[in-house]
Image: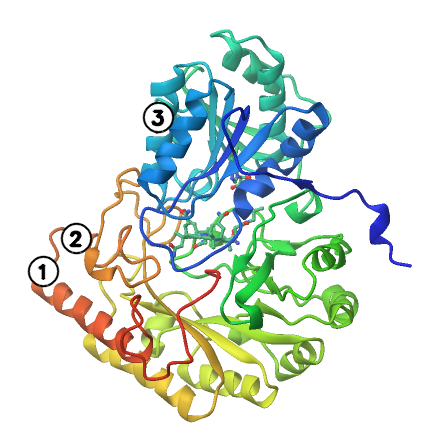
């Protein structure tokens, strides 16, 4: 008999509606996203809070519109006008920061100062200027491991009457160190005297999946698998490599820790019978325990699955082992066909020769590849590394992989974007007003944020020419958003942004 029957079912997080008391909002991407996914940052942060609210029969609901639209703001206003909302928790990436500000302003315009507005997520974690300091409409922002502190803050706030001092009183309870609290990070609020941001350290949190505690009943589009859906999950936090100059995961914080409990994966798969699993860990943690315990379990589930790898740390033995246990798709960042660029962006050990060798292993073991390309690389001092020649090198690498028979399931072209907290962030950029580059609308994250067209404004003629080369070159290997030129119609830009 299976053991999963004994475990309580994860709490279902319903869509928010008029009457909802605690609103959970994943701030929308300001352009058309090419990826789908669950709001995993927000669900990870609020899983314990959701359990608490469900137990107390306090209503809660999720808004995860994906991309921004007037329809989203109309729905939000309708919910706010119902007069029920007491707490708004927003998770935001840097790209969505202006949407976060608009959401907070709408809350204040409709509900005044009554609701508690809390912000967290990747932007708050990485950005030096914290949201509650930068945005007056936000009461509190929490960087770091948010789950216990968020629960404590909201729990206390809801216990208090609707008084102006409720935020201050709820924050006071955090100061009285609770033995049950966990996590490390920073709480920021303008209700305190300077400094507005204060660190907290209640010890480490256990790395666990939100899937154990809560669930959103929504399929996730992921075109590389049959049925075009997948269940995204992670079994670790952080990145075991952490050296890429464009990624904030190299900074301080969890350095890739694997969940101690992996039993919930079978339950999750049973709840989504027959649907492939996609492990979106930055790098799939191929630890001995994962290889000896998890892989045979995955094989036993009888569903296809995929994960993300860093080619320099891959062995042919591992590819074989993954394939034997049901893995049919590996996603990896090859980024550029130029060895000079790969070295400069921190991908030490990744070379054109190594890419050709290791992706050849995938062909031998019948595993399909998803490839991330990243154009417009800049050096840490901001100068542009990409040239017409290096773009051509990247395109020729893709052709060479095709000619060698590597089964390419999807190509994901990106434009390098400067994110806060990365080696590329020199502290001079304003991450509360994101520039737009309409010529990169076809790219996953090229049209919003700081890239080689928007760090220097206005861009010179050479940069504009390079941007056109990048767009044209990309169109020659993958279809555009309207499905135009495709050398190979079976290959698509698709799926969860890994
Ligand atoms: C899964 C994923 C997605 C999913 C889900 C997004 C999400 N954030 O939930 C999808 C596919 C939708 C996605 C989209 C994008 N993503 Co993404 N994604 C990830 C990924 C791989 C995992 C996120 C995760 O679940 N982590 C695990 C949880 C446990 O940790 P956490 O996210 O740090 O959350 C903790 C704290 O932040 C905090 N917290 C989080 N939310 C909240 C909310 C409140 C109220 C509080 C108090 C605390 C709090 O508590 C959490 C638990 O401790 C990360 C990389 C990574 N490994 O983290 C990139 C990452 C978050 N994505 C990133 C980017 C750039 C994007 C896109 C802009 C890409 C694009 N091409 O356009 C879009 C933005 C979408 C948007 N709406 O703005 C960057 C963000 C950098 C930044 N400063 O913004 C990351 C960090 C990758 C990277 N280093 O480049 N992504």
226 or 324, nearer to the observer: 226
| Residue lying at 40% horizontally and 93% vertically, measured from the top left | 403
* Circle 1/circle 2 CB separation < 8 Å: yes
Task: Give the residue displayed 39% in from the left and 40% down from the top.
Answer: 127
Where residue 125 appears, as percent x and y from the top left, is 47, 40
Q: Which residue is label 3 attached to? A: 106
Which residue is tagged 2?
A: 456
* Quadrant assignment for the N terminus: bottom right
Query: Is residue 37 in sight in this rendering?
Result: yes
Relative placement, left or right, of 259 versus 473 is right
* Cα separation between marks 1 and 3: 38 Å
445 and 206: which one is in front?
445
Provide residue 366's location: percent of width, then percent of height: 59, 85
Farthest residue, direction right: 1
The residue that label 1 is drawn on is 460
Q: Tell me the mark number nearer the camera, choosing from 2 and 3.
A: 3
């Amino acid at each position: 008999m299976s053991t999963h029957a004994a475990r309580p079912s994860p709490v279902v997080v319903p869509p928010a509606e008029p009457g909802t008391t605690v609103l959970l909002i994943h701030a929308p991407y300001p352009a058309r996203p090419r990826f789908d996914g669950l709001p995993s940052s927000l669900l990870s942060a609020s899983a314990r809070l959701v359990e608490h609210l469900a137990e107390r029969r306090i209503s809660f609901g999720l808004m995860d519109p994906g991309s921004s639209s007037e329809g989203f703001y109309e729905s939000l206003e309708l919910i706010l006008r119902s007069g029920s909302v007491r707490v708004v928790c927003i998770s935001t990436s840097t790209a969505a920061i202006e949407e976060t500000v608009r959401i907070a302003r709408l809350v204040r315009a409709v509900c005044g100062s009554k609701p508690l507005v809390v912000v967290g997520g990747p932007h708050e974690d990485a950005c030096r200027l914290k949201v509650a300091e930068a945005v007056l409409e936000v009461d509190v922002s929490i960087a770091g491991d948010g789950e216990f502190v968020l629960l404590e803050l909201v729990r206390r706030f809801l216990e208090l009457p609707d008084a102006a001092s409720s935020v201050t009183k709820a924050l006071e309870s955090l100061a009285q160190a609770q033995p049950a609290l966990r996590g490390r990070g920073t709480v920021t609020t303008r209700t305190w005297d300077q400094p507005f941001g204060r660190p907290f350290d209640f010890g480490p949190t256990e790395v666990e999946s939100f899937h154990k505690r809560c669930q959103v009943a929504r399929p996730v589009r992921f075109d590389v698998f049959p049925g075009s859906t997948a269940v995204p999950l992670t079994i670790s936090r952080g990145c075991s490599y952490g050296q890429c100059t464009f990624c904030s995961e190299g900074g301080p914080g969890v350095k890739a820790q694997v969940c101690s409990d992996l039993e919930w994966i079978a339950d999750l798969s049973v709840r989504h019978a027959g649907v492939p699993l996609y492990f979106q860990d930055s790098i799939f943690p191929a630890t001995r325990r994962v290889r000896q315990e998890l892989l045979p379990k995955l094989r036993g589930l009888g569903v296809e699955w995929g994960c993300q790898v860093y080619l320099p740390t891959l062995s042919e033995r591992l590819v074989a082992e993954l394939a034997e246990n049901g893995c049919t798709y590996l996603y990896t960042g090859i980024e550029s066909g130029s060895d000079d660029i790969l070295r400069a962006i921190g991908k030490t050990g990744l070379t054109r020769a190594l890419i050709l060798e290791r992706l050849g292993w995938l062909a031998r073991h019948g595993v399909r590849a998803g490839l991330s390309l990243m154009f417009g690389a800049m050096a840490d001092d901001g100068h542009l590394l990409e040239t017409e020649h290096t773009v051509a090198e990247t395109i020729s690498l893709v052709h060479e992989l095709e000619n060698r028979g590597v089964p390419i399931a999807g190509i994901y072209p990106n434009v390098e974007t400067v994110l806060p907290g990365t080696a590329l962030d020199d502290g001079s950029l304003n991450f509360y007003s994101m520039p737009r580059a309409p010529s990169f609308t076809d790219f996953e994250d090229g049209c919003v944020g700081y890239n080689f067209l928007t760090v220097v404004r206005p861009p010179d003629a050479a940069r504009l020419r390079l941007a056109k080369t990048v767009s044209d070159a990309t169109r020659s290997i993958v279809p555009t958003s309207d499905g135009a030129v495709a050398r190979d119609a079976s290959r698509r830009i698709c799926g969860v942004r890994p």
